[in-house]
Image (cartoon, helix red, strand yellow):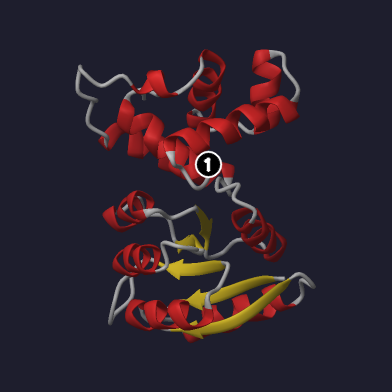
């Protein structure tokens, strides 16, 4: 069972998400709140698998809450799914840097919301391809170039580096497999080993690492 915490200052949004997620047999909404401070407290007490986190909220924003939740629960952190209207503001990118696992639009279809929670809970991270590709593009534009003495490729094999680069372009495992003429399961194995080496919890954080280190370029 996937345990979910809902965080949004609009009660109607929380109620709607609770109803939608309640239709899935493998998802349980264990709590909800209206601000970041309450989210940190509830996350510590309830230990959810996924936190659906609003970005802008009075009484504690989603960026600060995301950082604090992941820091306090570092031994077994939840996956934070950012719920956004997607205006490419600094809060969204701050949440990405803070460790958010993915993004979903507030007006997303009910089935897509359920799928997003499942994918994030499974560690897949990249949720909505349209949103994700735009986020990646903008994040890459904002990311400073790496220092010349850095050599991030030393951590990875040649194949792992190729796969991380393609992942950073927004490709799925199947698309990467077709690009490299290898099986999807092989892509998954290489990517899993790469994520372990660089200490990334999910695909989104792998993309962040790729752009920060210069393995991927805009």
Residue 181 placed where, x, y %? 71, 13
Vertical placement of 34 versus 76: above or below? below
Q: Image check: 199 left or right of 141?
A: right
Quarter of the image where the N terminus is located: bottom right
**Residue lying at the far front of the rendered structure:** 75
Residue 179 placed where, x, y %? 65, 16
Residue 40 sits in which quadrant? bottom left
Residue 163 or residue 84, whichever sits in front = 163
Vertical placement of 78 versus 17: above or below? above
Residue 167 or residue 70, whichever sits in front = 70
Q: Residue at x 49, y 86 (%)?
A: 11
Alpha-carbon neighbours of circle 1 within 10 Å: few (<14), some, or many (≥20)?
Answer: many
Residue 36 placed where, x, y %? 35, 76
Residue 63 placed where, x, y %? 32, 63
Which residue is label 1 attached to? 203
Q: How many labels sit on residues?
A: 1
Q: Image check: 99 left or right of 127?
A: left
Q: Residue at x 66, y 32 (%)?
A: 188
Residue 84 or residue 24, whichever sits in front = 24
Q: Image check: 54 left or right of 173?
A: left
**Residue lying at the far right of the rendered structure:** 25
Dot 1: element: helix
Quarter of the image where the C terminus is located: top left
Q: Residue at x 31, y 19 (%)?
A: 151
Q: Residue at x 42, y 43 (%)?
A: 135
Vertical placement of 215 versus 112: above or below? above
Vertical placement of 14 versus 215: above or below? below
């Amino acid at each position: 069972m996937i345990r979910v915490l809902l965080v949004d200052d609009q009660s109607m949004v929380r109620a709607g998400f609770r109803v939608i997620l309640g239709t899935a047999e493998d998802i349980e909404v264990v709590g909800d709140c209206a601000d970041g401070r309450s989210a940190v407290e509830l996350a510590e007490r309830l230990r959810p698998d996924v936190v659906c986190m609003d970005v802008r909220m009075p009484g504690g924003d989603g960026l600060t809450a995301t950082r604090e939740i992941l820091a306090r629960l570092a031994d077994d952190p939840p996956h934070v799914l950012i719920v956004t209207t997607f205006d490419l503001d600094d809060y969204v990118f701050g949440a990405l840097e803070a460790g958010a696992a993915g993004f979903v639009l507030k007006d997303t279809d009910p089935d897509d919301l359920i799928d997003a929670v499942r994918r994030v809970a499974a560690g897949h991270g990249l949720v909505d391809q349209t949103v994700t590709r735009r986020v990646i593009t903008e994040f890459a534009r904002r990311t400073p170039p790496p220092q010349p003495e850095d050599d991030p490729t030393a951590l990875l094999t040649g194949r792992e580096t190729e796969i991380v680069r393609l992942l950073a372009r927004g490709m799925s495992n199947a698309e990467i497999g077709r690009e490299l003429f290898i099986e999807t399961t092989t892509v998954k194995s290489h990517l899993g080993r790469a994520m372990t080496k660089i200490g990334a919890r999910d695909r989104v954080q792998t993309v962040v690492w790729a752009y920060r280190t210069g393995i991927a370029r805009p």
